Image (cartoon, grey):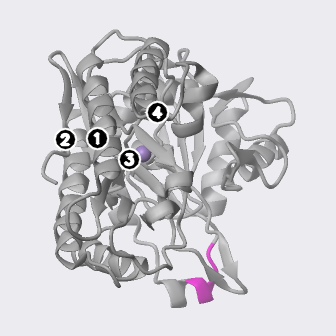
Amino acid sequence: MFSSEFYINNRKRLLDSLPDDSLVVITANGLMQRSADTTYSFQQDSNFWYLTGVDEPDAVLVMSVNEQFLILPKRSDSEDIFGGQLNCDEIAKTSGIVSVYEYSEGWARYKIMQKSRKTVHTIIAPPSKIVLTDSFYTNQSRSRLAQKLKRYNNEIVLEDVRGVLTEMRQVKQPIEVRAIQQAIHITESAFEKVKIILSPGVAEYELEAEITRVFISRQTTHAYQPIIAGGARACTLHYIKNNQVLAEGDLCLFDIGAQYNHYAADITRTLPVNGPMSKRQQLVFEAVQRVHKFALAIIKIGLSWQEYNKQVQYNMGEELIKLGLITENANKEVRRYFPHSVSHSLGLDVHDVCDYKIMKEDMVITVEPGIYIPEEGIGIRIEDDVLITSMGARNLSTMV
Ligand SMILES: [Mn+2]
């Protein structure tokens, strides 16, 4: 949905950030097995997409200042019959890369290109086949590529480009902000629907179905597994079973986000299942609201993430004392009721790349304080998506 200009410019910026005459090789994600011969729905590697706009599994980008091409994966006749043939013209048009080669021709060209070089720039993956990063399984395509590059030339040194890509991707271009804003609008319209049907006796999965219906009818998907958690279940931070029935007097926490043109929204609302909130629910809700407001107010260009986290956490500690939950504003105490980060970067990935050093203009981040009290069956989080501007934080998700 972006024109090829976006990807052409991103490739140029990457090359400009690397030493002269660098050779860059970056792989797409591969398909992941779901069971037997079926796969999970394909999700492209965000770096590969950022540089090419190509949504095919196992394609490889090869580029230097003088030459750029894409190598398509080996395809069998039956893959073409079941999956349809790859359209090289379409791929060339999307990416702005004129040369799209089939597997053997592409790798033959790479072999010649790397002959005169000592290093190749790529995204480094640890050597084992299944790689854990932040306790999530990463796609195996990166380690497969690294092995392949070593097979062509065992002497070649692989240099990691993740740092450069992080610096590029963490600051959003106007066209990216518009895509995120669109993902947010679609998510907001799902919230509007949910508010109408939210009532005691409704199951969490029925609400999930309604949200999914809105997303699919707008040709989007969930950017991540939605969390729809009634009552005490909201205290399980990544509750994704969504299989219980909502009870009268409970609150229901929704943490949902559409993925539009590869860009994610990430919004949380905590709504009463019916009627007004209880006195206690109201007090906790207002405390979260105040911390949320405080965080939004202090966000500014140049603020260090460390200072930001420290200030918001202190503010949260004061609220927790007022609620009678803790007696001392100390890290360990505060973490008992607020055990996650205030904010994270948002973009192509829902937890997008970021160096988390200094807040910069045109970063898009979430602001999501929460208070979780399992012993009272209350879990409340308010999460908005904001753009960091010269005027401070601009809230992009104010419609619900
Ligand atoms: Mn979030």
Q: Label 3 belongs to which residue?
A: 381
**Callout 4 environment at 10 Å: few (<14), some (14 to 19), or many (20+)?**
few
Q: Position of residue 60 (x, y in %)?
A: 57, 52
Q: Position of residue 366 (x, y in %)?
A: 35, 38
Residue 387 part of the magenta segment: no
Could you give the CA–CA distance between mark 4 and mark 2, rounded to whole angstroms? Answer: 33 Å
**Callout 1 environment at 10 Å: few (<14), some (14 to 19), or many (20+)?**
many
Q: Residue at x 83, y 43 (%)?
A: 127
Is there a contact, CB below 8 Å, between mark 1 and mark 2?
Answer: yes
Ligand 1: quadrant of the figure: top left
Secondary structure mainly formed by the magenta segment: helix
Mark linked to residue 237: none
47 vs 121: above or below? below
Mark linked to residue 385: 1
The one of 154 and 174 positioned closer to us in this rendering: 174
Q: Label 4 belongs to which residue?
A: 324
Q: Which secondary structure, mark 4?
A: loop
- Residue 226 visible in image: no
Q: Is mark 3 within 8 Å of ligand 1?
A: no
Q: Which secondary structure, mark 1?
A: strand
250 vs 359: above or below? below
Residue range highlighted in magenta: 75-79
Is there a contact, CB below 8 Å, between mark 4 and mark 1?
Answer: no
The one of 32 and 332 positioned closer to us in this rendering: 332
Three-letter code, disc 2: Leu
Taking the image as shown, residue 107 lies to the left or right of residue 210, namely right
